[in-house]
Amino acid sequence: MASANLAALGGKRSLRVVVIGDAGTGKSSLVVSAATDGFPEDVPRVMPPTRLPDDYFANRVPITIVDTSSSPEQNPNLITKCQSADAVVLTYACDRPETLNHLGSFWLPELRRLESKAPVIVVGCKLDLRDEEQDSLEAMMAPIMEKFQEIETCIECSALRQFQVREVLYFAQMAVIYPTAPLLDQNAQILTTRCRRALKRIFILCDHDRDEALSDVELNDFQVKCFNAPLQPAEIASVTMAIKEKLAEGVNDNGLTLSGFLFFHNLLIRNGQLETPWTVLRKFGYDNELKLRDDLLPAIKRAPDQTLELTSKAIDFLRGIFNMFDTDNVLARCHPATARCRCGCELSWWRRSYLVAVWSRAVVVWSSVGFEAEGGFVSFVVDRVFPIFVDLLPFLVGSSISLVKAAGKIHRRLRFLKQRRPIPCLLGRIRRGGRRDGALLPAEIEDLFSTAPENPWSSHLYMNCAETNVLGGLSFEGFISKWSLMTLLHPSNSFANLIYVGYSGNFGSAFTTMRKRRVDRKKQQTQRNVFHCYVIGSEGAGKTAFLQSFVKRQPYDALPVNGERFAANIVKLADGTRKTLVMQEITEGDIESLLSDRESLAPCDVALFVYDSCDEFSWQRTKDLLVKVVAHGKTTGFEVPCLIVAAKDDLDRSSLALQDSTRVSHDMGIETPIPISARVNDLNNIFCRIVHAAQQPHLSIPETEAGRTRRQYRQFLNRSLKVVSVGAAVTVVGIAAYRVYAARKNASS
């Protein structure tokens, strides 16, 4: 228990409680009384930090009490102590009502100004001097607690009488170990969004039979996992009955529903029983911010020029998740997951999920076999799909529906149809329609991430970074592109979200670490499937329009962003392979900060330099950026292939810019500028060219004047060494031949 409570402190060795308040309210007396279990006559003005014994409370969490002075000259010291506090005890004197009013007018606003995140315990000291005619504590504190939600609780005590002194520190400790704010919205008295999402994930993990309810057996397993103690049948019945009385939909014939599960925890929190929900959350790996603990996410060790990519296992899992939540596409409307029972009710969500998975497997086989084969769709269903479907019937069929007999009739009917004629036409339309319409709408994306603390793609980094349809639906390629971008930028966050949506494998099964880019250049090939391209250029050159064209959007659709802008999509190559390309826009003003980092070019596979072909000055500024980036790559050893793009090719081009850019590309030994026009969608196969440049990392490396001089010097030195070596060899051979000749001449004479 002690180790679990220490873990709740975020790795700290002890809990730090800071006592603040007006002068003369009893701060130091409270500290002395808590430390000595007595009340000395001579109390210092300010006590030094006092550590209580480890066994002060049964959970053995060490506590250090920090006293403070309220004098103005000690204000900087007070600020420092408040900012380092785990909990704040805010005191007022029960015999001085003005000190209570000062809490709301000064102290609590001051804590907010300092952006203190510590919970606040309001303590009325000198209870033995309180006027009996004063209002109750609840009546006095209600308006203050309503205004300041950071107040965890309020209590009155007397250091002189040793009354409720320990309780003050107990509440301070509990406010840190079991905080209320992450769990409950005090204003609305409902669970916070993160708490609701975390409990939903826990409910799904415990719902082993996927019937959207926790049976008695599942509730008992949940109890044993979290509290190491089973529930008696009478206890389970009592809990479910109490929930059903207050929330009819909280319990159904199968057991406790998700709404009932959430209601039960809300009830516990509102009644102050915070230890129970926090024990549950921490057993399933959550920290105080209701995210997975850092120790559950492995530390990623890699070189600066190494990246991580999703494995085929992770991609298959994401494909299943995509199909599961894609409930409105044509294929989904036509597959067995839309089946209803005889009373007209839909199958439960988890049963439909099973059917979606079966149908997805069927579509894979369908795509590989085709409906043009003999027997058409009916033959395919009878021989390939139906056996899988029948195997899953025990998991799909509940007590209220009976499909087993119907399955036999359907099978016989399909056999009969198979013998008569194939019917490929209808399913041909379904096949084409499924490929065309399969997309996740924004609401479905939100539903998919409803078990994560928040939607990770709500960040500006992922806004409009992938191709969508007219309704805002994200295709599977766009879905994988976004997930590849998240893996590229934040692999730990990518793995955490895989876990949130149900992935059960370890980190190694989800990601593979790619080879260093330096090694790729030496081997003159790469094994990567995801490429990172920097798009650099002068202001107004057309970088944003270029990124917009990559995700099939118009330039005017681009939203203004304060930070980085990304675009990710799948690029289909001529040989049929598919690669994921991530493009990052780097503005002219960001170059200096980019190049100030020695490893800034390490993640880059290709650098694309864009200039306005109509503007000579645009080319001059882009050329300066090109020279800076190339020089930085030479200096740091992270050289990258470079391409030059002449944007706005549909307008009148500047001949001087064209001539100079062609000359520069020739001098640097890279491909000549590629003309494109995003406005008329004439892109000159640019995205495939970028991928080809990344696949051959030893080519398209620019050569500067200094680099060319060094290369020529090395070539001259190598040629000189070769000449010297050949000359030395000829000399040695000549000397050896002369010695042989001289020896023979002497022997003959």
Image (cartoon, grey):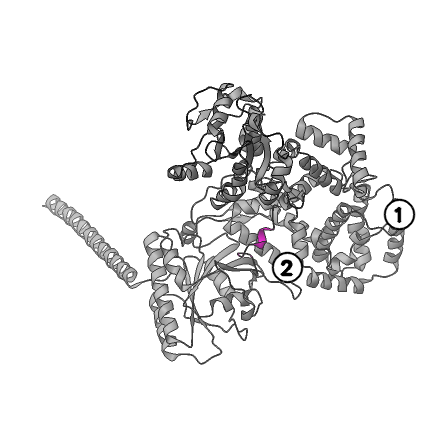
Numbered range of the magenta stretch: 455-462
Residue 408 numbered mark, or none: 1
* Label 1 crowd (10 A; few <14 / some 14-19 / many >=20): few
At mark 2, the secondary structure is: loop
Asked whether disc 1 touches disc 2, contact meaning CB atoms under 8 Å apart, the reply is no
Q: Is residue 328 left or right of residue 487?
A: right
Amino acid, disc 1: Gly
Count of numbered labels shown in the rendering: 2
In percent of the image, x 56 and y 34: which residue is there?
A: 121
Amino acid, disc 2: Leu
Per the image, is 461 magenta?
Answer: yes
Residue furthest to the bottom: 652
For marks 1 and 2, give the CA distance. Answer: 38 Å
Q: Nearer the viewer, residue 14 or 412?
A: 14
- The C terminus, quarter of image: top left
In percent of the image, x 41 and y 70: which residue is there?
A: 672
Q: Position of residue 167 (x, y in %)?
A: 58, 26
* Label 2 crowd (10 A; few <14 / some 14-19 / many >=20): many
In percent of the image, x 52 and y 42: which residue is there?
A: 108
Q: Nearer the viewer, residue 81 or 134?
A: 134
Q: Is residue 609 left or right of residue 434?
A: left
Per the image, is 171 magenta?
Answer: no
- The N terminus, quarter of image: top right
Q: Main secondary structure of the magenta part?
A: loop
Residue 480: in sight, yes or no?
yes
Residue 474 numbered mark, or none: 2
At mark 1, the secondary structure is: helix
Rendered view: 743 above or below 712: above
Q: Position of residue 566 (x, y in %)?
A: 51, 59
Q: Position of residue 346 (x, y in %)?
A: 82, 51
